Image (cartoon, helix red, strand yellow):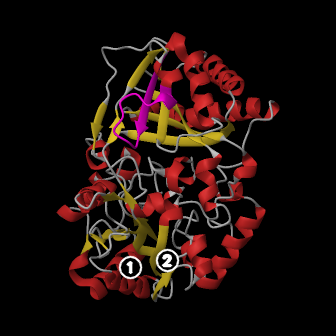
Amino acid sequence: MPSYAVSCCAQLAGALGGRVFYPGDQAYNNTEASYFSKQEGLVTPSCVVLPETSADVAKFMSTVTGITNCSFAIKTQGHAPAAGAANIQNGVTLDLSLLNSTSISEDHSAASVEAGATWESVYSTLNVFNKTINGGRNGGVGVGGVTLGGGISYYSPQVGWTCDTVVNFEVVLASSKIVNANATSNSDLFRALKGGGNNFGIVTRIDFKTVSVVDVRGGHLFQSGDKIPSVLTALANIASAKEYDVHASIVTSFVYNSTSKEWLALSVPVYTLPEYNPPFYNELFSIDNITAESTASISSVSVLSNEAPPPQVYQAFATSTYAASAELLINIFSVANETVSLMQIPADVTWSLAFEPLPTVFTKHGEGKNVLGVSAADRDGLILLASTSWSDPNSSEIAQALGPKIIGIMDAAAEKAGGLHRFKYLNYADPSQSVLESYGDENLAFLRATSKKYDPEGVFQKKVPGGFKLGL
């Protein structure tokens, strides 16, 4: 361990006592094992700090900012797969996972959630009140990370991005001051945090508007590769529906088998009412499916989100956004298939393209109120997540390049056809992608000005290398 790292951790231990943990300590090992991707878990910080209160986080900030050459990472549940996104080599990882409480207001209209909580814990707490939050669909993901990146929920067509339902952020600034950011206090910071990532402070608590809930439809729909053009057509028609059914939230993945060079279509057609066969999905449901594997269920959001944690393997994400056009989707999928079929992809690599609707009925809720830069003027679209997982480190070079390479080819085809949207979704992006720039010049300038106001020394630009930075 470098001497500067030893000094940094020693000074933090002096300030925070038993909240600082070193390699070999069980708490340190637990943090390393909790990351979604193996490459993040293999990054070895000099020490891990596990605060229990926002006051602990403030003490951390007042200490770390006074230490030369003491960089740090900020982690909630560590679902971003890129190495260094929420972990740091020879630095300090601030693990917020013990800040995980959820409480509901007396009238049940709002819930206060600490940033390190998992969405499943939030949903199970609120379910007894017949309430939920417009939060992440995977219950093991952290509240803070999803929200600061925008956030997509089963309820997004009804109320917008996850960040659009925030009424207040509690934030520890670089100065170590604890402030609230909302519509009337620090309102510029409030807006900047709605999609601006980790560039402004450490968010320790988020207050959300709640959503009233009943049981919802879940399940998996499997369809063979020869049905993909029909599936893409149905998906485009869902995303561009003139009367979008706001209870519908669907992700359709196309999973590639690198050995057989064949594809499988897998849809997760959720409906936020207890209806097995909502008419809005009729076109998709009418396509022949693999009935032995397809499922449908009615359950609470808490049960639906409570997925078993996957084993820690290597992972990579990349993203883009396209117009909701069947002709376009079929075209760019064909281009992707032609490219990937000519590649020699190791057998341990699993690769998929997942599309999810981004209709204007969703984006209108946050227009001008968040910094994401999407609006009704963009028209209906679909977000793409290219996801790669692999187990053999010898496959890493090929596997990590796969998503960005294929998306680059798909983007070129979409741009030529006039169907490429500017927006890149932060929570799905590869580190090489220009996420904050995709929000548009005006929003980027606003984010930079807000950073300079609340972090004039650039602590979160210089000492926190993980995440998407503002280029200051």
Give the left or right position of residue 341, taking residue 207 as reference: right
Q: Quadrant of residue 442?
A: bottom right
- Asked whether 271 falls inside the magenta stretch, the response is yes
Q: Which x, y percent locates residue 256?
A: 48, 21
Residue stretch rendered in magenta on the structure? 263-281
Q: Quadrant of residue 111?
A: bottom left
Give the left or right position of residue 259, taking residue 438 as reference: left
Relative to 298, residue 301 above or below: below
Question: Which residue matches tag 1?
Answer: 8
Q: Which x, y percent locates residue 139?
A: 32, 50
Q: Quadrant of residue 292?
A: top left
Q: Nearer the viewer, residue 184 or 397?
A: 184
Q: Are marks 1 and 2 in contact (CB under 8 Å)?
A: yes
Q: Nearer the viewer, residue 200 or 235?
A: 235
Task: Give the number of marks.
Answer: 2
- Asked whether 232 falls inside the magenta stretch, the response is no
Q: Which x, y percent locates residue 330?
A: 66, 21
Q: Residue at x 68, y 38 (%)?
A: 322
Can residue 432 be seen from the camera position used here? no
Identify the mark nearer the N-term, 1 or 2.
1
**Mark 1 crowd level (few <14, some 14–19, many ≥20, 10 Å Cα):** many
Question: Which residue matches tag 2?
Answer: 69
Q: Secondary structure at mark 2?
A: loop
Q: Residue at x 26, y 76 (%)?
A: 52
Give the left or right position of residue 77, taking residue 30 as reference: right
Separation of residues labelled 1 and 2 (CA atoms): 8 Å
Relative to 281, residue 12 above or below: below
Quadrant location of the N terminus in the rendered image: bottom left
Q: Amino acid at mark 2?
A: Asn
